Amino acid sequence: MAKKNSRNTKGRIVSAAWKLFYEQGYDDTTVEDIIFESETSKGSFYHYFEGKDALLGTLAMIFDEKYEELKATMDPDMNAAEKLIFINHELFTMIDNSVSVELLGRLFSTQLVTRGEKHLLNRNRTYFKLVQQIVREGQSRGELRTDMSANQIINDYAMFERAIMYDWCLADGEYAIAQYGDRMMPMFVKCFLPQNN
């Protein structure tokens, strides 16, 4: 039971932090604000995080919570290409509605300079497990090409998605990322379809 409570405490801190980062801005959010919003203690906060900067890498956790939701709500009758486009649309809609350019930019910058684990590339993330499941099922059903390995397709898809997010950050969020993804992702996913399509 203690493990579940510890996960809940850490999750509450992460959720509160990202809510405040979005509403108040990263620089204007203090550790005390996060502790108050999460209804936890200073000891709990510092048990999980060295400070506010350590929370930047947890955006991947927020994204993965979204993917857990999507796994449960995704229409099983969609083909693999439709599923890949759907999860991208849902992620980008979430970014449009609750992740600022500043926060996503900070996440990318921490990933560029980190010496340790790069959260965005962690293959144990729900994101990669979900994409892998979609791709492998799609290949076995003949919906996706098999002259590329599942890992190649997964890597290319993830790289393209990160490229769109990075470009959105460079453009300072001057366009809706979900709308842009809705235009670009179907064109990109087409390259994963069997060659006779």
Image (tube, helix red, strand yellow):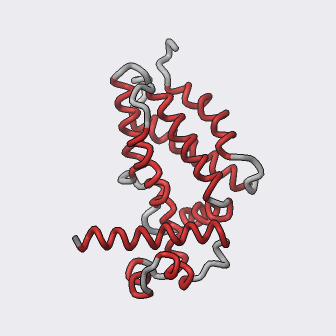
Residue ranking furthest to the bottom: 43
Instruction: Examine the image and state in which quarter residue 186 appears.
Output: top right
Tell me which residue sits at (49%, 54%) in the image.
63
Q: Position of residue 159 (x, y in %)?
A: 54, 44
Q: Position of residue 152 (x, y in %)?
A: 44, 36
Residue ranking furthest to the top: 196
Left or right of residue 102, residue 17 in this image: left
Closer to us: 18 or 145 = 18
Closer to us: 37 or 188 = 37
Tell me which residue sits at (38%, 42%) in the image.
72
Q: Position of residue 8 (x, y in %)?
A: 36, 69
Location of residue 101 with respect to 189 vertically, above or below? below
Location of residue 9 with respect to 100 vertically, above or below? below
Q: Position of residue 101 (x, y in %)?
A: 68, 59
User: Across the whole image, how many numbered discs are drawn on residues?
Assistant: 0
Closer to us: 107 or 173 = 173
Location of residue 177 with respect to 60 vertically, above or below? above
Left or right of residue 9, residue 166 in this image: right
Location of residue 123 with respect to 57 vertically, above or below? above
Residue ranking furthest to the left: 1
Closer to us: 107 or 22 = 22
Tell me which residue sits at (59%, 60%) in the image.
108
Tell me which residue sits at (54%, 76%) in the image.
53
Left or right of residue 171, residue 80 in this image: left
